[in-house]
Image: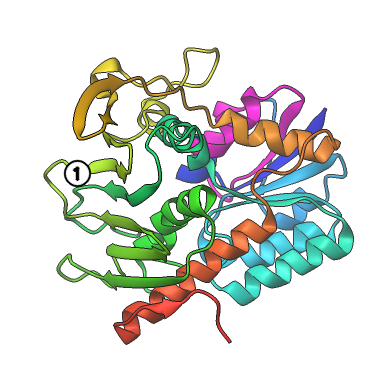
């Protein structure tokens, strides 16, 4: 049994981490750091509730520390946990800066600790479906990959740290890590990157929209997120030499979690058939299309892998090196947007 300490019980800790830690065999949510309130104690009465990081790290039985706090706190909390001899999971983004993330990777390597970033969207059902279609060659050679994460949220959230002008805030560091990570998993490092990062809402102190283009030799990956999108945009739109795939609607797990449901059995994470994507296949110049079932998503898979990596029975799925690639892309996107030009991926 691996005892887990969770730092933070806001949206990330309460919705995305605690339910899946609790649902994975041989992981035990043993302690939760919630600075104020009793919602953690009510939801997880068997967990020990503490109020400070020092209290949490003083619990000797904890082997894994999960950090689900505002981005500006990631570096110091993760560093303290690693130096205390614990393995660490950090909610995305890794840290506010590449330099801080690289220092954490160095500390983890020096002390032989497992370090991973919570890229749960690799376990979205639609992404799993896309990954399978591409790996099986069903679409031929990919020529255009579009990935959207659009919403309509015209009003600023009062007192929301993600919408304060501080390091690591804004939509680029919130949703960018998901879309960038998925593209890098599918296609590897690009030759160059171009980005337009901007604020579209009146009075927004942080970016709330981005367009990123990853340049590959015979392909482009277009990544977009915005909060003033009121008409349907595809979650994925993929074109290839043998066909294409079009999918609308987000993976259902987030909405299901917010509604109060928790993962219990194999029915979890299944897309409604009415939301399945369309697969287009080509026979010469003749095209045919059909609804294509979306595979089941399951964020439990992330923590199953972390458990197995800690036990030495599986390689880590989301590695520190991959997390650093995402940080590099985020910083490159900011610089590209500032300079209004495409930038080479590898700098001299």
Q: Could you tell whether 320 is left or right of 57 in the image?
A: left
**Residue holding disc 1:** 233
User: Which residue is rendered at x = 74% and y = 29% of the image?
Assistant: 27
| The C terminus lies in quadrant | bottom right
Tell me where residue 64 appears, x and y as whole percent.
Answer: 76, 43
Is 26 within the magenta?
yes
Tell me where residue 87 appears, x and y as whole percent.
Answer: 78, 49
Q: Could you tell whether 28 is left or right of 148 in the image?
A: right
Q: Is residue 226 above or below residue 97?
A: above
User: Which residue is rendered at x = 26% and y = 24% of the image?
Assistant: 275
User: Which residue is rendered at x = 41% and y = 24% of the image?
Assistant: 260
Tell me where residue 63 appears, x and y as whole percent.
Answer: 82, 42
Tell me where residue 60 appears, x and y as whole percent.
Answer: 88, 44
User: Quick one: 24 or 65, which is closer to the camera?
Assistant: 24
| Residue 48 appears anywhere in the view | no
Q: Which portion, as a residue range, is magenta?
A: 16-45
- SS for callout 1: loop
User: Quick one: 22 or 292, which is closer to the camera?
Assistant: 292
Q: Could you tell whether 344 is left or right of 41 in the image?
A: left
Residue that extends furthest to the front in the rendered view of this protein: 284
| Residue 340 appears anywhere in the view | yes
Residue that extends furthest to the left in the rendered view of this protein: 231
Q: Could you tell whether 39 is left or right of 154 in the image?
A: right
User: Which residue is rendered at x = 30% and y = 68% of the image?
Assistant: 207
């Amino acid at each position: 049994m691996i005892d887990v300490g969770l730092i933070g019980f806001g949206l990330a800790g309460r919705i995305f981490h605690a339910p899946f830690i609790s649902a994975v065999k041989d992981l035990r949510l043993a302690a939760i750091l919630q600075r104020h309130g009793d919602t953690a104690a009510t939801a997880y009465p068997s967990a020990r509730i503490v109020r400070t990081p020092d209290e949490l790290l003083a619990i000797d039985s904890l082997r894994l520390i999960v950090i689900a706090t505002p981005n500006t706190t990631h570096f110091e909390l993760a560093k303290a946990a690693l130096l205390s001899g614990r393995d660490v999971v950090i909610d995305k983004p890794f840290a506010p800066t590449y330099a801080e993330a690289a220092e954490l990777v160095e500390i983890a390597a020096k002390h032989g600790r497992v370090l991973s970033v919570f890229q749960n969207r690799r376990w979205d059902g639609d992404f799993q479906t896309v990954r399978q279609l591409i790996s099986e060659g069903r679409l031929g050679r990919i020529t255009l990959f579009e990935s959207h994460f659009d919403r309509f949220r015209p009003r600023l959230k009062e007192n929301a740290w993600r919408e304060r002008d501080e390091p690591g805030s804004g939509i680029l560091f919130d949703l960018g890590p998901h879309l960038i990570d998925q593209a890098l998993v599918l296609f590897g490092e690009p030759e160059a990157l171009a980005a337009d990062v901007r604020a579209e809402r009146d009075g927004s102190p942080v970016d709330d929209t981005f367009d990123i283009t990853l340049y590959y030799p015979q392909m482009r990956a277009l990544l977009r997120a915005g909060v003033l999108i009121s008409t349907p945009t595809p979650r994925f739109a993929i074109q290839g030499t043998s066909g294409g795939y079009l999918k609308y609607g987000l993976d259902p797990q987030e909405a299901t979690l917010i509604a109060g449901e928790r993962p219990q059995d194999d029915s979890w994470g299944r897309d409604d058939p009415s939301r399945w994507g369309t697969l287009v296949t080509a026979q010469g110049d003749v095209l045919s299309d059909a609804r294509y079932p979306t595979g089941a998503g399951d964020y439990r898979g992330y923590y199953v892998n972390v458990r197995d990596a800690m036990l030495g029975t599986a390689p880590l799925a989301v590695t520190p090196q991959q997390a650093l690639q995402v940080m590099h892309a985020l910083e490159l996107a900011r610089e590209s947007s500032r300079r209004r030009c495409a930038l080479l991926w590898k700098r001299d």
